[in-house]
Image (cartoon, rainbow, N blue to C red):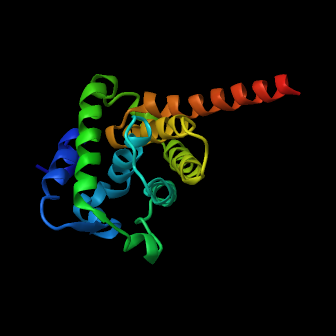
Amino acid sequence: MPESNRSLLERCLAISEMLKEGQEITFGELLQKMGESGPLLLVVIISIPFLLPMPVPGLSVPFGIVIAFSGVAIALKRPLWLPRFFREKKFSVKTLQQIFATGTKFLRKIRPLFRERLTIVASSWAVQLMAGLLITLCGLLLALPLPPGTNFPPALIITLSAIGLLERDGLLLILAPTLLALIIIGVGRLIGEWH
């Protein structure tokens, strides 16, 4: 089946099946396995642990930075470029399999919430650019040493944006920036009350 006709879950499961050999894998090797949808698939999978009580010790900073670079590639519609340090960074296949297992389980639960709709929005160049920039901004936030619990909002915005682009779901692509605006307004009000 052509990759473009596969659902998000099918693509994630197919990649998970490829990760049964070897003790370590690099981001570069993982992207090769992901094919043409690599940056978006990578963004979805490595942002999900930030939504769940799943520790990723030592990986939050590189994950956040890779998400940020992926967002730039998505916004500019260019192949994902990573600095050599990140492209060649190794992590265990076992850890990655755990992330994929958790990610696919989570995606199964939320599957009824996303589908192809409002495609006129999803196919808009301006919306795709905005989604890529949102992913970049929120990826940089994930890479910062912020207090526990503060990773959830940017990770949610990243996930909504990436799934919206992959599944051509215009509603999710509208919800992502709306959520960011609401968070900014809420934080602004809190700061105002403190002063």
Answer whether residue 96 is visible to the viewer in this image. Answer: yes
Q: Which of 153 and 194 is in front in this view?
A: 194
Q: Is residue 168 left or right of residue 11?
A: right
Q: Is residue 7 visible?
A: no
Above or below, 95 relative to 151: below
Position in image of residue 189 (x %, y %)? 77, 24
Residue at the (43%, 56%) spot, across then down: 59
Q: Where is residue 45 in the image (x, y as percent from the top left)?
A: 33, 46
**Toward which corner of the image does residue 143 lie, by quadrant?**
bottom right
Against 102, is 2 above or below? below
Say if 5 sits above or below 176 in the image.
below
Give the left or right position of residue 29, taking residue 189 as reference.
Answer: left
Q: Name the residue at 35% across, 53% down.
A: 42
Q: Quick check: 129 left or right of 3? A: right
Pinpoint residue 195: horizontal percent, then vertical percent: 89, 27
Residue depicted at x 28% and y 22%: 112
